[in-house]
Image (tube, grey):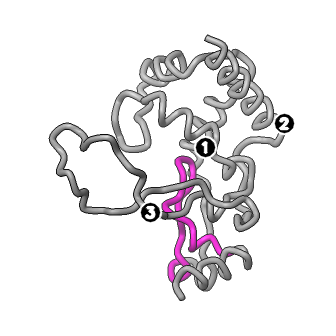
Amino acid sequence: RSRRGKRHAARRGDVSVLGAAPYGYRFISKHASGGEAHYQVVPDEARVVRQIFEWVAYERLSFNAVSKRLQEQGICSPKGNPRWHREVIGKLLRNQAYKGSAIFGKSRVGERRPRLRPLRGQPEQPRIATSRYPGDPAKQSAISVPALVSEELFAAVAEQLAEKTERQQRH
């Protein structure tokens, strides 16, 4: 019933069904805003997000170069670390919420993937006996949020990331 209720709320466009707000936004609950939950743009973080997108799209910087620039400017990561990891920058650049449409249902939970052997220092039977899988695109719902970057800039970054992936696969 909970999953069905969340899916219904996502189709209505409620932001409350999403997880935590991405970097650049602050989640305002329906109790704090007087009726409807929404994302509020955090101006300082939004400026950093736009800067990252522009560096990758126009200057064609790598994730490591972006991380170095942010560290030189003294900008902390979303968790407060002085160094931005490549994975954080990659997830930020792929997040569709920045172009104005957050997606509900990107992943789903299913049966645990089989392993050849347990990870070092981990028990043979894990505590959580499930794995995360990509969600079915037909069951995903787009929820509109304030856009931080334009569609063109997001498309330019997506093209750059696809080119990078293709280059890596060739090697």
Mark 2 or 1 closer to N-term?
A: 1
The three-letter amino acid code for the residue at tag 3 is: Glu
Relative height, residue 151 to residue 133 (above, below): above
Q: Which residue is mark 2?
A: 152
Q: Is residue 166 left or right of residue 121?
A: right
Residue at coordinates 60% horizontally, 83% vertically from top-left? 4
Residue 46 is tagged as: 1
- Could you say which quadrant of the image residue 91 lies in? top right
In which quadrant of the rendered view does residue 94 lie? top right
Relative vertical location of residue 43 with respect to residue 53 in this rendering, above or below: below
Q: Quadrant of the N terminus?
A: bottom right
Q: Residue at x 63, y 80 (%)?
A: 36
Q: Amino acid at mark 1?
A: Ala
Alpha-carbon span between mark 3 and mark 2 = 38 Å
15 magenta-colored: yes
**Which residue is rendered at x = 51% and y = 83% of the image?**
31
Residue for badge 3: 111
Assign a secondary structure to mark 2: helix
